[in-house]
Image (cartoon, rainbow, N blue to C red):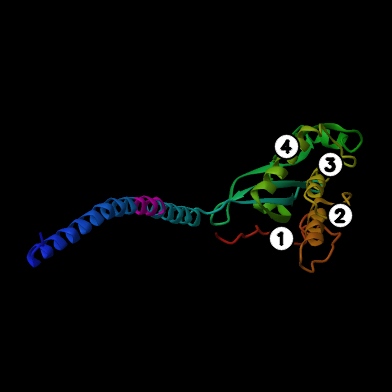
């Protein structure tokens, strides 16, 4: 029996429809799976990126807004009734360049009496360390030399000063005096140092002259100690 043209067209249409349906049925799951996979891959880097960027920005702002600590050591001398005294002042500076709870390192006879001081010109006498009366009074400072330090450098120098104080139990005007103590600290830092047999003021001035970039002349006269010049002005650190 022969099919009519209408039946043939219906049959062809049914075949085409079934083919399209089958193709669509296979493509839909594949497309869905591919879409899900693409979504999974793309969301991994995109989701945390804004948080990471925000964290980095916040960290950057925090570091920029928080002023870094600035550490220093200042070699000083001051006037006294005899020939003066030398010591070191060390610590950190605030944002305006002012000292914040500075420490003092030095050596001196273990007494407020002048008798151990006089005996110490003959034989060693017991020593004390740290501040003495007048060390932090600006009107008595005769010379100074400041060196800025990183935090790591400061920690090493501060530890050495404590070690030096623990291992120098006696004071002697010639064998181990306040200038000897300051000289040891300066040498530990790698600074060039003048001879120790001089006035404290002269030693500090020459220490500064030997290690600064200026054309400061070496001197042998304690001008402030002898009343020939005013006290050494404080070092002005620029605000941060």
User: Which of the two residues, 161 or 85, is positioned nearer the viewer here?
Assistant: 161
Q: Quadrant of the C terminus?
A: bottom right
**Magenta span contains residue 43:** yes
Q: Earlier in the sequence, mark 2 or mark 4?
A: 4
Q: Position of residue 125 (x, y in %)?
A: 85, 31
User: Which of the two residues, 77 or 42, is positioned nearer the viewer here?
Assistant: 42
Q: In which quarter of the image is the N terminus?
A: bottom left
- Residue that badge 1 annotates: 230
**Magenta span contains residue 19:** no
Report the span colored magenta: 37-45
Disc number at residue 177?
3
Disc number at residue 197?
none
Q: In this view, does 123 lie above or below 47?
A: above
Q: Is 46 left or right of 78, judged from the image as shown? A: left
* Helix, strand or loop status at disc 3: loop
Q: Earlier in the sequence, mark 3 or mark 1?
A: 3
Q: Earlier in the sequence, mark 4 or mark 1?
A: 4
User: Which of the two residues, 111 or 29, is positioned nearer the viewer here?
Assistant: 29
Q: Position of residue 110 (x, y in %)?
A: 77, 32
Q: Is 11 left or right of 129, judged from the image as shown? A: left
Question: Cβ–Cβ below 8 Å for labels 4 and 1?
Answer: no
Q: Looking at the image, is mark 3 or mark 1 nearer the viewer?
A: 3
**Crowd band around label 3 with a 10 angstrom C-alpha radius: few (<14), some (14–19), many (20+):** many
| Predominant secondary structure, magenta span | helix
* Helix, strand or loop status at disc 2: loop
Disc number at residue 194?
2
Q: Where is residue 75 in the image (x, y as percent from the top left)?
A: 73, 51
Q: Is 147 left or right of 198, judged from the image as shown? A: left
Q: What residue is drawn where x is 87% and y is 51%?
A: 198
Q: Looking at the image, is mark 4 or mark 1 nearer the viewer?
A: 4
Question: Cβ–Cβ below 8 Å for labels 3 and 2?
Answer: no
Q: Which of marks 3 and 4 is nearer the N terminus?
A: 4
């Amino acid at each position: 029996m022969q099919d009519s043209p209408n039946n043939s067209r219906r049959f062809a249409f049914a075949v085409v429809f079934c083919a399209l349906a089958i193709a669509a049925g296979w493509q839909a799951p594949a497309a869905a799976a591919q879409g899900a996979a693409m979504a999974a891959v793309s969301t991994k880097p995109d989701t945390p990126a804004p948080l990471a960027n925000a964290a980095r920005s916040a960290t950057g702002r925090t570091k920029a807004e928080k002023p870094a600590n600035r550490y220093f050591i200042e070699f000083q001398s001051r006037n006294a009734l005899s020939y003066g005294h030398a010591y070191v002042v060390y610590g950190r500076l605030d944002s305006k360049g002012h000292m914040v709870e500075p420490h003092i390192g030095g050596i001196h006879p273990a007494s407020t009496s002048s008798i151990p001081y006089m005996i110490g010109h003959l034989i060693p006498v017991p020593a004390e360390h740290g501040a003495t009366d007048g060390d932090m009074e600006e009107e008595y400072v005769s010379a100074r030399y400041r060196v800025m330090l990183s935090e790591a450098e400061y920690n090493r120098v501060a530890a050495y000063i404590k070690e030096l104080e623990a291992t120098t139990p006696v004071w002697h005007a010639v064998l181990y005096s306040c200038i000897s103590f300051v000289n040891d600290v300066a040498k530990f830092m790698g600074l060039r140092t003048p001879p120790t047999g001089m006035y404290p003021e002269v030693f500090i001035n020459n220490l500064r002259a030997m290690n600064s970039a200026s054309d400061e002349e070496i001197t042998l006269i304690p001008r402030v100690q002898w009343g020939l010049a005013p006290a050494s002005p404080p070092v002005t650190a620029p605000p941060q």
